């Protein structure tokens, strides 16, 4: 367990950073300008755009996390059985 502790702490730290609303809801300046102008008109485009950005941000982490988890399970079984 001590061997994996730095990796676990890094993962938890990155997860906390991604969940902070100010950094997670950041957008490019051009998107931000178009969303601000549409919000003045009463449109709800900003909420959809932020959710789309967060969705695209999370997918690579889920993909690589799943691959790492499967690899970790397979190597763990070999150590325990063997």
Image (cartoon, rainbow, N blue to C red):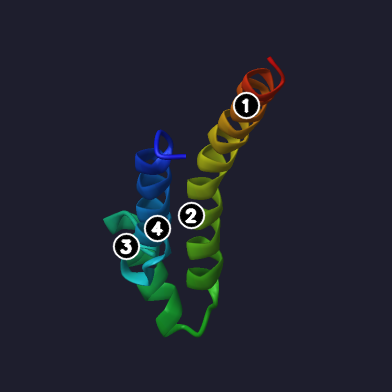
Q: Of marks 3 and 4, which one's residue comes earlier in the chain?
A: 4
Q: Which element type, helix, strand or loop, lies under badge 4?
A: helix
Q: Secondary structure at mark 3?
A: helix
At 50% across and 56% down in the image, what residue appears? Answer: 54
Occupied quadrant, residue 77: top right
Q: Earlier in the sequence, mark 1 or mark 4?
A: 4
Q: Residues within 10 Å of mark 3 (few under 14, many from 20)?
A: few
Depth check, mark 3 against mark 2: the one in front is 3
Q: Which mark is residue 18?
A: 4
For marks 3 and 1, the one nearer the N-term is: 3
> Earlier along the polypeptide chain: callout 2 or callout 4?
4
74 vs 65, left or right, is right
Count of marks overlaid on the render:
4
**Residue assigned mark 3:** 23
Q: Is residue 6 above or below residue 72?
A: below
Q: Quadrant of residue 81?
A: top right
The image quadrant that residue 4 belongs to is: top left
């Amino acid at each position: 367990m001590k061997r994996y502790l730095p990796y676990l702490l890094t993962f938890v730290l990155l997860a906390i950073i991604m969940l902070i609303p100010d950094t997670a809801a950041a957008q490019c300046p051009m998107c931000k300008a178009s969303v601000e102008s549409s919000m003045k008109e009463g449109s709800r485009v900003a909420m959809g755009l932020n959710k789309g950005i967060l969705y695209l941000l999370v997918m690579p982490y889920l993909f690589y996390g799943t691959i790492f988890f499967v690899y970790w399970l397979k190597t763990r079984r070999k150590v325990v059985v063997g």
